[in-house]
Image (cartoon, helix red, strand yellow):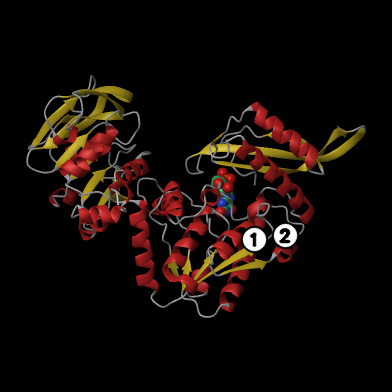
């Protein structure tokens, strides 16, 4: 077997490493780049986790991290409201890298001085390395680095050695003379920092002495072992929505416990064209997951009849979903565990000190169920980012068209037929949406856009079909670029693609005579129309 084909865990065993134990903790002080640091560390083959920057030293010690990274922050360390690390972390003697604010706050807490910079630096600057440091091994003396700071370190405490400067920053990097502590003013996690990757690797492998080798295959083996150890001879129930997250969770749990996993797909009639059938075919038939598809279409339509307020629609769907899921789960006998596709960004948002109290969407429709049914939660994706979930899906052998699917909201097409929902409108919307997606795939734009869909508007407009006047509905097309759905920009799709989609929808979908394209970003709009 070639090295390239070995799993991460096997590579590490061969190198004598223990990847399962290697873990970098990233102390988050609210920088917009914190998640990027976590990703870069994982890309380097070392598992990383983000914790609030103010986590106590004893809690950090209890997690036994291999190394610590202190993130940047919009705050100023010398202001009263600034989030400060517990000074005790410097006594843990763990290899430590302070980035931007992480640099400044460390300097400040260890005898140095920080103040507002005479000249703030935003954007790339030339970084000049003045003294040797293992952090800059293999990096040229001068390189372009991404800076984003309005404060600066003006003096270093006893034991610190200045290592680099820029035109505007006298101290742009420092290292401790006796301890494995390194500080940098620039952001190595940002692609604009030309040697950023190398600097992070130097920290992980030269300074912290880690072995690396963490990979999705290694993660997969570990996740399967963890689920088996937790569930023992118990049973798991898992809601399948057709989306990437639940598909990956179900496949992973199936690998761990086989037929002691029961999947439930609630067909509420608000899914995309052919979606329930596709999931049943791919997971039920091909992979032999134990799957029940509950046809609850009539029941949902009934409850939604005449309701046009978006939030009421959402609440009805959520409550009905729980009711159907609960009935079905109980029918399958005693079940102790509920598997859910919670992702890392959801976990971080609720835990992070720096981000303040952001409202997270209750993106899982089974919320409230664990307590009611006395179920224990299994969340095997809770430490992964969306693209890592996709990589895990591939490692599990799931086909690309399932793994690369655009996100789809829990309330489904109900929030895309504006106003009251009915079966005829859903039919129109499903057809229009399928044509748009087909055209995106044909022109290779499906993967170049983060999310795309059709919306059926509750208005009719005048048109002419053949020689006849028509008075039919309007379809709006929406395609957006986004990182995480929190903000988004509309995708500049080629006019020729829009022309094809528009012409096909207006001609092939009965009841539609006009197609418009939504060119609004979020904010001020949201991605969905309701
Ligand atoms: P908005 O419309 O808030 O959407 O800009 C951001 C992302 O979240 C999805 N979305 C939902 N997902 N339940 C979900 O599971 C919901 O109620 C819901 N509303 C919006 C939306 O599709 C987009 O990806």
Return the x and y of residue 17 as percentages of the image width and height: 20, 54
Q: State the residue in front, 146 or 220.
A: 220
In this view of the protein, can residue 88 be seen by the observer? yes
Q: State the residue in front, 6 or 406.
A: 6
User: What is the distance, in whole Å, between disc 2 and disc 1 at their CAs?
Assistant: 8 Å
In this view of the protein, can residue 516 be seen by the observer? no
Graded by Cα atoms within 10 Å as few (under 14), some (14 to 19) or many (20 or more), the crowding at tag 1 reads many
Q: Are marks 2 and 1 in contact (CB under 8 Å)?
A: yes
Residue located beneath label 1 in the image: 317
Question: Residue 30 falls in which quadrant of the image?
Answer: top left
Return the x and y of residue 50 as percentages of the image width and height: 32, 50
Question: Residue 460 falls in which quadrant of the image?
Answer: top right
Q: Earlier in the sequence, mark 2 or mark 1?
A: 2
Question: Residue 234, relative to residue 511: is it above or below?
Answer: below
* Image point (56%, 74%), residue name: 329
The furthest residue to the top: 167
Q: Indicate if the residue with disc 2 has its beta carbon within 8 Å of ligand 1.
A: no
Along the horizontal axis of the image, is 449 left or right of 211?
right
Question: Residue 399, relative to residue 254: is it above or below?
Answer: above
Along the horizontal axis of the image, is 515 left or right of 271?
right
Return the x and y of residue 144 as percentages of the image width and height: 28, 24
Query: Label 1's element?
Result: helix
Residue located beneath label 2 in the image: 304
């Amino acid at each position: 077997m070639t090295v390239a084909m070995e799993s991460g865990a096997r590579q590490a065993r061969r190198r004598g490493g223990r990847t399962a134990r290697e873990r970098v903790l990233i102390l988050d002080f609210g920088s917009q780049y914190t998640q990027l640091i976590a990703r870069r560390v994982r890309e380097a083959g070392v598992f990383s986790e983000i914790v609030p920057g103010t986590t106590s030293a004893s809690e950090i010690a209890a997690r036994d991290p291999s190394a610590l990274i202190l993130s940047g922050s919009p705050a100023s360390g010398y202001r009263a409201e600034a989030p400060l690390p517990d000074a005790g972390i410097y006594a843990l003697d763990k290899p430590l890298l302070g980035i931007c604010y992480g640099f400044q706050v460390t300097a400040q807490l260890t005898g140095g001085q920080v103040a507002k910079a005479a000249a703030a630096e935003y954007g790339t600057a030339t970084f000049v390395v003045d003294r040797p440091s293992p952090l800059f091994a293999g990096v040229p003396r001068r390189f372009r680095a991404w800076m984003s700071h309005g404060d600066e370190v003006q003096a270093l405490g006893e034991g610190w050695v200045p290592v680099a400067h820029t035109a505007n920053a006298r101290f742009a990097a420092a290292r401790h003379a006796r301890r494995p502590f390194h500080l940098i003013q620039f952001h190595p996690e940002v692609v604009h920092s030309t040697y950023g990757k190398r600097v992070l690797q130097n920290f992980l492998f030269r300074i912290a002495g880690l072995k690396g080798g963490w990979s999705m295959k290694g993660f997969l083996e570990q996740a399967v072992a963890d689920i088996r150890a937790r569930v023992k001879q118990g049973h798991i129930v898992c809601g399948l929505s057709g989306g990437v997250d639940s598909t990956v969770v179900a496949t992973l749990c199936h690998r761990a416990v086989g037929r002691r996993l029961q999947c439930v797909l609630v067909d509420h009639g608000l899914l995309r064209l052919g979606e329930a059938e596709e999931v049943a075919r791919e997971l039920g038939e091909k992979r032999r997951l134990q799957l029940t598809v509950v046809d609850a279409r009539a029941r949902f339509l009934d409850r939604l009849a005449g309701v046009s307020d978006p939030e009421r629609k959402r609440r009805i769907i959520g409550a009905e979903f729980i009711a159907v899921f609960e009935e079905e789960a109980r029918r399958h006998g005693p079940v102790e565990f509920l598997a859910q596709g919670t992702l890392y960004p959801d976990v971080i948002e609720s835990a992070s000190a720096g981000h303040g109290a952001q409202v997270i969407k209750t993106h899982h429709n089974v919320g409230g169920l664990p307590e009611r049914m006395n179920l224990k939660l299994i969340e095997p994706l809770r430490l992964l980012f969306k693209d890592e979930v996709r990589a895990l899906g591939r490692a599990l052998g799931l086909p690309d068209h399932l793994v690369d699917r655009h996100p789809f909201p829990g309330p489904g097409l109900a929030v895309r037929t504006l106003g009251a929902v009915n079966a005829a409108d859903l039919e129109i919307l499903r057809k229009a949406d399928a044509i748009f997606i087909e055209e995106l795939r044909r022109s290779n734009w499906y993967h170049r856009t983060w999310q795309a869909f059709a919306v059926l508007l509750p208005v009719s407009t005048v048109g002419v079909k053949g020689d006849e006047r028509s008075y039919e509905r309007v379809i709006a097309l929406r395609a957006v670029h986004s990182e995480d759905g929190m903000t988004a920009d509309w995708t500049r799709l080629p006019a020729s693609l829009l022309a094809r989609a528009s012409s096909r929808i207006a001609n092939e979908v009965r009841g539609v005579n006009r197609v418009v394209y939504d060119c609004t970003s979020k904010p001020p709009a949201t991605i969905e129309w309701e």
